[in-house]
């Protein structure tokens, strides 16, 4: 181990001992608002240690200062410097220390912009040089400042966790030791998203009957890569002693081994999948989508093809990250991806981790780009335990669902899937957008440094989300209120559409006619038995042999309804085969005409499906011309898909036309077709003339009504969920406030902790002020007190700080309301005002230029 690595490791071990002095300095300086006078008092050593004097250069905003620090192992230099408001660059013999206010400014700045310590240090060095301050060595500020900044960030993170751990000890307990109680989500989940998991009793719904208890989304990002370092710089990258949202590599490796074992990829295990023969289609166990549709979805998405490399392992050590977020865009867990391709074990590791922190009966809706393939694999290979899989409802995120086949959209579209409301599953995309500024610096960082920076940015986003929960709920509530409940009975039409469009494609077979005739004969026998049953009940009713006329009439009505449905089904089956009521069904078993007719119907249905898929690929191919160069791969993939479908379509057209030429004399023969003919959509000679098309297919108003009804249903689900989440948010705040007050009572004699508890109290009071103004119109799902925890005085003080601008000395700014040109009414035109200001500013510069050249 190198000397530098030993020094960095010692810094990590030193951090816990600096938490207390750091909290003390925060209290004495009023959160770094004021800097106490530097007093380098001599330190007395009681252990008679060997002492030495260090010359330390101290970096402030506008000057440098050299201090002499007398230190020993009992009183290390970093501890003495921290008491002076400075943070050392090394744990034993630091030569540079930086003012905490400078470091805090940089730490705050680097979560809003791309972190770049090199540019910052160069600018600071030039600034100080212009004022007569210059370091003795070249390029030394960047290295030492970067080290001080990094470990200061670690210190601030651990200090915040330490303060909150003292508060959380007084929260209602949810676990015993390391075992999670089966009644509530874990404390970890509660800390990640208060709205999803902050309830006191997650089973408390008071009649809301939500189908899903929470929604989460999963997605991968392959732009967050880390280059492979050939120079061995990873050896200078020690672990950071902070909490992380990343799943450990060991858990991911265990899931990978589990999947290999389930799929039979381990030596001596497993069997190959039985391939469907010919044109055969059907359902796999547990799936509601035909096999051919699932195969088409798999071919259409790069993410479904695990063997397709999205990055080269030769040039990159880490290929990206995968995230699990709740529906409020709060990060629950991240996983570091080290393989080329979007492997399923990353997704399943995240899912398994989530269910380890949930009660055993809590249901989850999971939105994932290729959820159809994920559910297929889970059912086929039993990748997840049945106790977990039975509590999951899979859906596809809105942005990607339109790339799936239509039957897949009917089942997995979140707007068509019961229980998801208007959740779009695109929280991961918003996370990638927030993290995109980290792509350049993390591409060349170390492994642990990369994870630490991502964790810091996630903490920053957590704070932003916490402040906007009230606004988020208000926005969703307003959207749902614009949709009024529709009582029209059109749900049966929607169910009929799904049932029809989810049927597997028919196939050609030499025994098709026998099978169809057998079904019709069986249905005729069933109809005859129902006729006898109805007749017997009617005779019994006429004879008065009934004990209860009301129950008997209900039974008779049920039998008549059943008989009517069977009769309608029989009529439709006969019409689809072109069979009249007087035909002898037994003689039709070996009918060549009927066999040809069924073959033609099967070929035509399959031909139509291929044409639809080709049209889908052509549309995507045409759209790719209007995209940037980043869509080149999609363009090539779509073009290849089109070319692959053409031979199959031509073969089906030839087969269809040959079958049409075999129609017997006197029969209404179907028209010959070509792939570009409109006749492909006509069923002359194939369907019965008396069959009217269903309303969901032929009635434009019915199709619009179905779409509107689905939207209303999702909004009604969202309305109930928002009422519940509003109550959960208030319960979380009340529990946090009570725990904070109890923790402050126990730490009454510790002024440092009381100061930080008061800061937490001001933060919570400000959140209550902001949240209450947003969620006030939302009714509660169950009775709750009016108070959210803070007293009226706390809220008044927080409202004054939240809504009133303040001067540097703490006094409120005074405005003349009559002369305030940006009044409340005029703030509605902020964009217009900004344009006017820009025009005025440009005019001022024009006038200035004209004056400067005026002779």
Image (cartoon, helix red, strand yellow):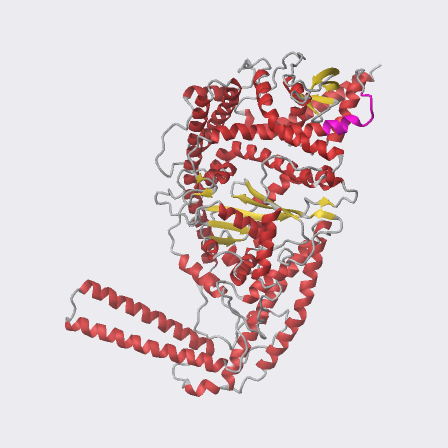
Q: Residue at x 67, y 49 (%)?
A: 338
Residue 89 sits above or below residue 413 on the image: above
Q: Which residues are magenta?
A: 135-146
Can you give x and y, in whole percent of width and height, for residue 60 in the image? 71, 18
Q: Picture quarter containing residue 564? A: bottom left
Where's the C terminus, which quadrant? top right
Quarter location, residue 52: top right
- Where does residue 435 sit, x and y in percent of width and height? 64, 39
Which one is nearer the viewer's eye here, 734 or 711? 734
Quick check: can you spot residue 252? yes
- Position of 47 with respect to 283 (left or right) is right
Residues 646 and 393: in front is 393
Does the magenta segment cover residue 323? Answer: no
Q: Residue at x 58, y 30 (%)?
A: 158
From this view, report whether residue 156 is shown above or below residue 699. above
Residue at x 42% of width, y 31% of height: 735
Q: Is residue 423 visible?
A: no
Q: Is residue 218 above or below residue 275?
A: above
């Amino acid at each position: 181990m190198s000397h530098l690595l030993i020094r960095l490791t010692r810094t990590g071990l030193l951090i816990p001992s600096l938490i207390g002095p750091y909290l003390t300095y925060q209290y004495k300086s009023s959160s770094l608002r004021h800097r106490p006078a530097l007093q380098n008092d001599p330190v007395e050593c009681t252990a008679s240690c060997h002492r030495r004097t260090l010359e330390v250069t101290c970096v402030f905003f506008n000057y440098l200062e050299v201090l002499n620090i007398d230190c020993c192992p009992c009183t290390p230099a970093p501890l003495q410097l921290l008491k002076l408001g400075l943070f050392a660059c090394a744990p034993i013999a630091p030569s540079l220390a930086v003012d905490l206010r400078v470091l805090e400014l940089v730490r705050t700045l680097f979560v809003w912009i791309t972190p770049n310590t090199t540019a910052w240090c160069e600018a600071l060095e030039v600034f100080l040089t212009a004022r007569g301050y210059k370091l003795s060595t070249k390029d030394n500020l960047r290295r030492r400042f970067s080290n001080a900044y990094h470990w200061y960030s670690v210190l601030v993170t651990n200090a915040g966790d330490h303060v909150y751990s003292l508060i959380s000890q007084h929260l209602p307990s949810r676990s015993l030791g390391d075992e999670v109680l089966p009644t509530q989500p874990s404390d970890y989940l509660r800390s990640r998203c208060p709205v999803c998991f902050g309830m006191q009793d997650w089973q408390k719904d008071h009649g809301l009957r939500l189908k899903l208890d929470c929604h989460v989304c999963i997605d991968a990002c392959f732009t967050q890569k880390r280059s492979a370092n050939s120079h061995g710089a990873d050896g200078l990258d020690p672990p950071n002693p902070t909490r992380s949202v990343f799943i450990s590599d060991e858990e991911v490796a265990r899931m990978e081994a589990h999947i290999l074992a389930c799929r039979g990829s381990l030596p001596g295990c497993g069997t190959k999948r039985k391939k469907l023969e010919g044109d055969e289609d059907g359902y796999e166990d547990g799936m509601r989508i035909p096999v051919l549709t699932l195969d088409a979805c798999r071919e259409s998405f790069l993410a479904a093809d695990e063997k397709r490399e999205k990055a080269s392992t030769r040039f990159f050590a880490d290929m990206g990250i995968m995230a699990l977020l709740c529906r409020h865009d709060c990060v629950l867990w991240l996983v570091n991806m080290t393989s080329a391709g979007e492997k399923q074990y990353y997704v399943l590791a995240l899912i398994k981790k989530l269910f380890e922190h949930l009660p055993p009966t809590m249901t989850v809706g999971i939105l994932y780009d290729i959820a159809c393939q994920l559910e297929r694999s889970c059912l086929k290979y039993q990748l997840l335990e049945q106790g977990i899989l039975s509590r999951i409802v899979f859906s596809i995120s809105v942005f990607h669902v339109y790339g799936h086949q239509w039957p897949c959209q009917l089942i997995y579209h979140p707007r068509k899937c019961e229980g998801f409301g208007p959740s779009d599953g695109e929280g991961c995309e918003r996370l990638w957008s927030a993290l995109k500024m980290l792509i350049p610096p993390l591409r060349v960082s170390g492994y642990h440094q990369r994870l630490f920076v991502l964790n810091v940015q996630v903490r920053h986003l957590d704070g932003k989300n916490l402040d906007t929960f009230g606004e988020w709920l208000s926005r969703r509530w307003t959207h749902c209120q614009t949709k009024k409940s529709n009582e029209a009975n059109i749900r049966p039409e929607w169910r009929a559409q799904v049932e029809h469009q989810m049927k597997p494609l028919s196939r050609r077979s030499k025994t098709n006619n026998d099978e169809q005739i057998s079904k019709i004969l069986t249905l005729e026998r069933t109809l005859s038995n129902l006729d006898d049953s109805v007749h017997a009940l009617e005779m019994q009713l006429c004879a008065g042999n009934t004990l209860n006329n009301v129950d008997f009439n209900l039974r008779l009505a049920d039998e008549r309804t059943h008989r009517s449905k069977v009769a309608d089904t029989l009529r439709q089956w006969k019409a689809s085969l072109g069979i009249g009521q007087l035909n002898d069904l037994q003689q039709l078993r070996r009918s060549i005409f009927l066999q040809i007719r069924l073959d033609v119907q099967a070929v035509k249905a399959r031909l139509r499906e291929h044409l639809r898929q080709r049209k889908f690929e052509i549309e995507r191919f045409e759209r790719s011309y209007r995209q940037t160069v980043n869509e080149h791969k999609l363009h090539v993939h779509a073009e290849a898909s089109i070319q692959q479908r053409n031979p199959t379509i031509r073969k089906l057209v030839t087969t269809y036309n040959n079958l049409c030429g075999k129609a017997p004399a006197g029969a209404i023969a179907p028209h010959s077709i070509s792939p570009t003919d409109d006749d492909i959509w006509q069923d002359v000679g194939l369907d019965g003339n008396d069959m009217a098309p269903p309303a969901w297919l032929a009635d434009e108003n019915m199709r619009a009504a179905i779409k509107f009804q689905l939207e209303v249903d999702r909004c009604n689900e969202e309305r109930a969920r928002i009422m519940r989440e509003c109550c959960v948010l208030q319960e979380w705040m009340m529990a946090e406030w009570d725990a904070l007050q109890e923790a402050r009572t126990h730490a009454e004699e510790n002024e440092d902790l009381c100061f930080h508890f008061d800061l937490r109290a001001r933060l919570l009071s400000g959140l209550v002020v902001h949240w209450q103004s947003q969620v006030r119109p939302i009714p509660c799902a169950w009775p709750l007190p009016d108070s959210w925890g803070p007293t009226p005085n706390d809220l008044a003080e927080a409202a004054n700080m939240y809504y009133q601008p303040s001067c540097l000395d703490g006094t409120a700014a005074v405005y003349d309301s009559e002369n305030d040109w940006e009044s409340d009414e005029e703030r509605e035109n902020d964009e217009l005002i900004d344009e006017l200001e820009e025009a005025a500013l440009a005019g001022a510069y024009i006038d200035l230029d004209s004056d400067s050249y005026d002779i």
